[in-house]
Image: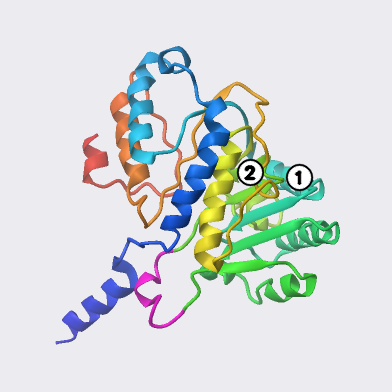
Amino acid sequence: MACPVLGALTYLLFGINRLHSRANEWKKKLADNRRDSLQPFLPDMLAQCVPEPMQTLSRLADKVSNQPLLAGNAISPLFNGDEAYPRMLAAIDSAEHSITLSTFILRNDKLGKQFVDALSRAAERQVSIRLLVDYMGFRYSFPTLKKRLKKAGLQYAEFMPPNWPRTFPFLNLRNHRKLLIVDGRTGFTGGMNISDHHCRDSRQCIPIEDIHFLVEGPVVTELQSIFAEDWYSSTGEELEGALWFSTPETPGSTLARAIADGPDDRFNMLRQLMLGAIGSAQTRIRIMTPYFVPDASLEEA
């Protein structure tokens, strides 16, 4: 008798994997605004810019993601927190106009406090700051850093806090994005939350190994757009203009595309592109992931 009830309850808590975001109209507006500014950075001819075996995948990404492939970027890998966090903190300390930071976990530890302190110093310099932390990720440490953030007067929001019963069906939909964009020009993204556990410290029994990336160039505009969408969904505030979106520069020669995946209209986007990437492989496939749980279609590919 209890199974149908428990089954229905479990589905409500964890089974719904789509979210029709209230930011859909805002996303369209944002896409229209950025299209003109990014036009100069679109590769002229795909055949000249992308190796022939990768052109089919590039066309698939165009259709599936509706995100442009942009030229002129510079991307540097940063291994573990020992390399990533000092660069991120230095970027925050050099900020002149704006900082946007999104993370799943902001842990109340030495590293987390360093980030809050750096953001506080930036706020004292009149830098505009927006911080977005997932509601569940905030609670990976107790007490949380919320009191420290409020004391510093930092503007922050929690992604999808409980609002019964409206958000009850979406309890399992969390924001795992990790984005830091400084002055709309310098970006950091990758797999690392803000936590001591990503540093190779002698006190850490099992440090978490991961990679972040320092990103410069037109693709940073796309990263900022993704943050702006999440921020609007959480707060209703529209981030627009030169304060948040600087004129794109071309510090490198790397082609890059920012692809956001989530439980909204982008549902299953990365899965489709992974299938396309596997199908395009000529000589080898390399996979780096903390969670290797392929479905039947990926196993078949």
In this view, the residue in front, 297 or 47, is 47
Disc assigned to residue 28 = none
Magenta stretch: includes residue 164: yes
Q: Which residues are magenta?
A: 163-173
Three-letter residue code for mark 2 = Phe
In this view, the residue in front, 103 or 109, is 103
User: Which residue is labeled 2 in the image?
Assistant: 188
Residue displayed at 33% across by 43% down: 271
User: Which residue is labeled 1 in the image?
Assistant: 91
Marks 2 & 1, CB-CB < 8 Å contact: yes
Q: Percent from the top left, x then y, of residue 18?
A: 33, 61
Above or below residue 139? Residue 75 is above
In this view, the residue in front, 268 or 41, is 41
Residue displayed at 53% across by 35% down: 36
Q: Percent from the top left, x then y, of residue 288?
A: 45, 39
Magenta: predominant secondary structure element? loop
